[in-house]
Structure formats: structure tokens, C-alpha cells
């Protein structure tokens, strides 16, 4: 007798993928823990995490907005300030290293960077270059705004039942002297690039795994019962600084992130992985979920992912692709990384 004789159909490529009876991927995700409608859910990470937060709100789940917009702000000002994009206004956190850095600042594990960038008499935050895009009138105003975000992080970590974090990139830029990580290369969104100060890093498995582990452990010092749901963004790199072809660089980056997510699920309690990356990139869909630029995800693709997500939570089978209602337009996402396409 072979151990393969007793395996379910979803364990075999032919029956689970190649010969699926409907346009779904049945049995793809069985949640490791329950997420109740009342559980406070915090979302952070790369651009694709924005879809998850908005889908949670649309579903009536308890998405935690720890840094809501002031009532006096109009819609334009709220959008410019990136209110309601993630659970706190850090902007996109493409790497676990960036998540860990913000947590260390918020929880007093190390002093926050006092670096600022100036342009036309305005001050800009190097670690939130796409947040408050008009800048600040003074450094004091900049740091006061950042303190609000740090307070929001503390609030979110304390109150959250579940953190959903989307791993996006392995490539990052770091200050050579202070070691701080930037969300995007200086000189792209804001600031000026200085090769003597700014170093490129392509974070491998060990660095990425250690940073994410440290981030989870640090959050659990404040909230021991915090559960973590990891995802990997299916959005390819806009550009790579490795010198390699961007396709190879993307494969490396996503492979590292997916391997880290899998390892953490094995090593840490109450850590789970939702396969949004696998749903979008499955060969059976032949790239149908990508926009013509072969990078951004179509609204139909996002809806299909979220149908699998909620079906998993409800213990049901996801609805077929044909019944997936389009979700948020990808043009509405805030993605600093996408600005690199300008240099092409």
C-alpha cells in the first residue's frame, strides 16, 4: 500500500488543477484558526494588502482603522494623507524589515530616525514619502505627524485579534551609516540619491525570516494572543536593481517570500498563510488575472482571490470565476514601487 492512495483529490495536480470541474481551486485553503466577524483585523504590507482591507470592510468584518482621518478633512485631503489605506499611515511596508523598523520605533525598542528631506521649503518624511505628499511646514510638524502614526501602531497591535501582512519585495534600500531601511529608493518619490549614503540590499531567506520572526515576537510582547495571517503579493517587481533580468529577479523575490511564509507557519504558533499569490499565478488561468501591463491585477482577479478567502473562513467552496464580482480598480491603489516605471 502506498501513502498516496489515501490522499484527497486536492493533493494531485491532475485532479486539483488540470481537471478541475469549475473555475475555482477547491480545497486550496483551510484556515489554521477562526476569524470571527467581530475580531479586530489589522492590515499592513505591500500594495496588494489594500485590496484585503477594503474587502474586509465591504464584507462587514471588523477592519481596524487605528489612524482615522480628522473629521474636517475633505476627500482630496484624506486621499493625499493616505487615510484608510492601511490600519495605520506608514504607507506600503514592502519588506518585513520595514515592518520591524516601525514596530521598534513605536514600541521603544530603538530611537526613530531624525532624518528629513527638504524640497521647496517643505519637509518630507523619508520613511513615508508618499504619505502627506505636500510635505510639512516644519520638521516639528513632520515628527508630530509621525508620532500619531507610531501611536496608531501601538493601538493597532494592542487591539488586534489578527494581523494580515502581505509580503511584497526582497529588494530594499538602506542608509549605510544608520542602517535604517527606506520604503523606496531615495530620489525616486522624494529625496536625493547619494551612493555614498544609500546602499542596495536584496534581502535573502535568512534576513527576511529573521525580520518577520522578530516583528511577530515583538508584537506579541504587547499582545500575546495575536494571530498572524501572511500572504505574498502576486504583483511582479516594477524594476530591479540587482542587474538581473526583472523576470528572474521577480521569481527570486517571490520565492524567498513564499518560502519564508511557509517556514514561519511551521515554526511559530498561530501563524497561517493565505495563497493569494498561488491563485493569481496559477497556470490554469494563463495570466488572465493580469492587466495588459502584465503586472497589475484585474478587479476580477482581486474579486476571485477574495471569494476564496471568505469561502475558506466560512468553510465553503468558492464561487466560480464567472460569478466573481469585480472589486476595487487597481488604479486606486497607492504604490510607491510603481513609480519606478517612470525610469523605463
Image (tube, helix red, strand yellow):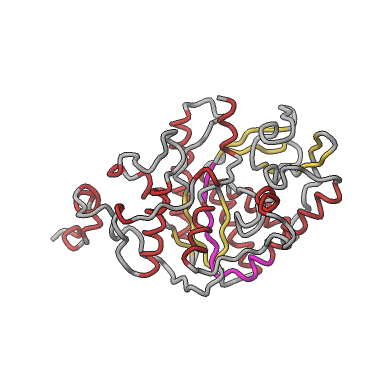
Residue in the image at 13% along x and 61% along y = 1
Residue in the image at 42% along x and 44% along y = 298
Residue 292 picture location, percent across and down: 41, 34
Residue 229 picture location, percent across and down: 49, 61
Residue 125 picture location, percent across and down: 75, 44
Q: Is residue 273 left or right of residue 17?
A: right
| Residue 161 highlighted magenta (yes or no) | yes
**Position of 112 relative to 254 (above/below):** below
How many numbered circles does the render carry?
0
The magenta region covers 155-169
Q: Quadrant of residue 130?
A: top right
Residue in the image at 63% along x and 66% along y = 157
| Residue 30 highlighted magenta (yes or no) | no
Q: Quadrant of residue 319?
A: bottom left
Q: Is residue 137 left or right of residue 126?
A: right
Q: Is residue 88 left or right of residue 17?
A: right
Of residues 304 and 219, the one drawn nearer to the viewer in this rendering:
304
State which quarter of the image contains the C terminus.
Answer: top right
Amino acid at each position: 500500500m502506498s501513502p498516496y492512495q489515501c490522499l484527497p483529490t486536492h493533493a494531485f495536480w491532475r485532479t486539483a488543477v488540470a481537471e478541475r470541474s469549475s473555475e475555482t481551486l477547491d480545497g486550496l485553503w483551510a484556515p489554521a484558526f477562526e476569524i470571527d466577524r467581530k475580531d479586530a483585523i489589522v492590515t499592513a504590507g505591500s500594495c496588494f494588502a489594500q485590496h484585503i482591507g477594503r474587502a474586509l470592510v465591504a464584507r462587514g468584518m471588523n477592519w481596524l482603522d487605528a489612524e482615522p482621518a480628522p473629521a474636517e478633512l475633505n476627500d482630496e485631503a484624506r486621499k493625499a494623507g493616505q487615510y484608510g489605506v492601511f490600519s495605520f499611515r506608514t504607507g506600503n511596508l514592502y519588506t518585513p524589515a520595514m515592518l520591524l523598523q516601525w514596530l521598534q520605533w513605536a514600541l521603544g525598542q530603538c530611537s526613530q530616525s531624525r532624518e528629513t528631506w527638504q524640497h521647496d521649503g517643505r519637509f518630507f518624511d523619508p520613511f513615508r514619502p508618499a504619505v502627506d505628499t505636500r510635505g510639512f511646514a516644519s520638521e516639528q510638524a513632520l515628527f508630530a505627524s509621525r508620532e500619531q502614526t507610531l501611536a496608531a501602531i501601538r493601538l493597532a497591535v494592542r487591539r488586534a485579534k489578527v494581523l494580515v501582512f502581505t509580503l511584497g519585495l526582497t529588494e530594499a534600500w538602506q542608509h549605510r551609516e544608520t542602517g535604517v531601511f527606506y520604503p523606496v529608493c531615495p530620489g525616486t518619490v522624494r529625496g536625493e540619491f547619494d551612493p555614498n549614503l544609500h546602499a542596495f540590499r536584496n534581502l535573502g531567506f535568512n534576513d527576511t525570516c529573521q525580520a518577520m520572526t522578530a516583528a511577530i515576537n515583538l508584537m506579541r510582547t504587547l499582545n500575546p494572543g495575536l494571530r498572524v495571517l501572511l500572504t505574498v503579493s502576486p504583483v511582479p517587481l516594477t524594476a530591479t536593481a540587482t542587474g538581473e533580468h526583472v523576470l528572474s529577479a521577480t521569481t527570486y523575490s517571490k520565492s524567498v517570500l513564499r518560502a519564508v511564509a511557509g517556514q514561519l507557519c511551521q515554526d511559530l504558533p498561530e501563524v497561517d498563510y493565505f495563497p493569494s499569490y498561488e491563485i493569481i499565478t496559477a497556470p490554469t488561468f494563463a495570466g488572465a488575472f493580469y492587466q495588459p501591463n502584465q503586472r497589475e491585477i484585474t478587479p476580477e482577479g482581486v474579486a476571485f482571490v477574495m471569494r476564496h478567502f471568505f469561502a475558506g473562513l466560512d468553510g465553503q467552496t468558492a464561487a466560480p470565476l464567472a460569478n466573481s464580482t469585480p472589486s476595487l480598480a487597481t488604479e486606486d491603489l497607492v504604490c510607491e514601487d510603481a513609480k519606478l516605471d517612470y525610469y523605463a
